[in-house]
Image: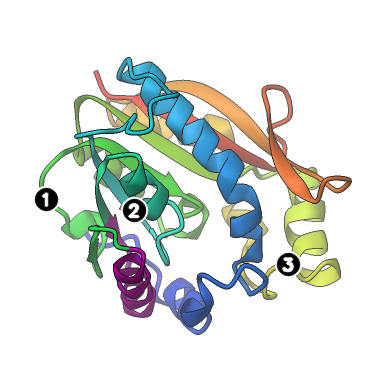
Amino acid sequence: MSSTVQKSEIEHFSKDAPHWWDESGPFAPLHRLNPVRLDYIKTQICSHFDRDPKDFNALDSLNVLDIGCGGGLVCEPMARMGANVIGIDADEVAIEVAGEHAEQSGLNINYQATTAEEMNGTYDIVLALEIVEHVSSIEDFVSSCAKLVKPGGLIIFSTLNRTPKSFALGIIAAEYILRWVPRGTHSWQKFVKPSELAKAARHNSLKPGDITGLIYNPLKSGFTLSKTDIDVNYLMSCKKP
């Protein structure tokens, strides 16, 4: 299968890659939503694999593949919870930054500058966070992800819904008014409706499960999870029978 990576997308993010761990830099929105996103991921994993979420090493011995890992914002917490983590990204600069930060943090994470299509093996958990809206083909990308999950495993996606509300908040507000992210970071036409993502999952022998929204609370300047509002950001968990 040919790569679903788009060169223009990689070039857009690569110029800011040295600033992945700058909480007030170009990736500030990801730092803001990361605690809530991680809470969702941990909860879903512990529920699926019958682990105690209160256990410090709740993910002990589980093999995790983070596709489009960027600078490692999710890989590092996964490793701290005991998982064996591989983080991959087509952006070589991001992978270099991620590796250096993990080494400084005393964490053993396997980072590789590659794509989902080029990976071999299977994993207990595959994460594809904030990447679906940047690939050239949703169907092909989900197919690549599905092949990398063990039977009985779990895939967690997070992306942006294609709605008028997401255009107003995800494009106009985030890029032009609040300037959270550089202009041109997202294309609204490439946002993915939950029904489209679920359809691609089912076509690739995955069973879509939980769908939870991520909403921004301006009063707290942070994100919260929502079971009812998936109009802008959402997470979807899929099981592989």
- 3 is higher (above) or lower (below) than 206: below
**Residue 202 in sight from this viewpoint:** yes
Is 132 or 137 nearer to us in this picture? 132
- The image quadrant that residue 186 belongs to is bottom right
Provide residue 78's location: percent of width, then percent of height.
Answer: 36, 44
Mark with earlier residue (2, 1)? 2
| Amino acid type of the residue tagged 3 in the rendering | Trp
Mark found first going from the N terminus, 3 or 2:
2
Which span is picked out in magenta?
A: 87-105
Quarter of the figure with residue 207: top left
Q: Which callout, 1 or 3, points at the residue further toward the start of the chain?
A: 1
| 92 in the magenta segment | yes
Q: How many marks?
A: 3
Residue on which disc 1 sits = 120
* Amino acid on which disc 1 is placed: Asn
Q: Which residue is mark 3?
A: 180
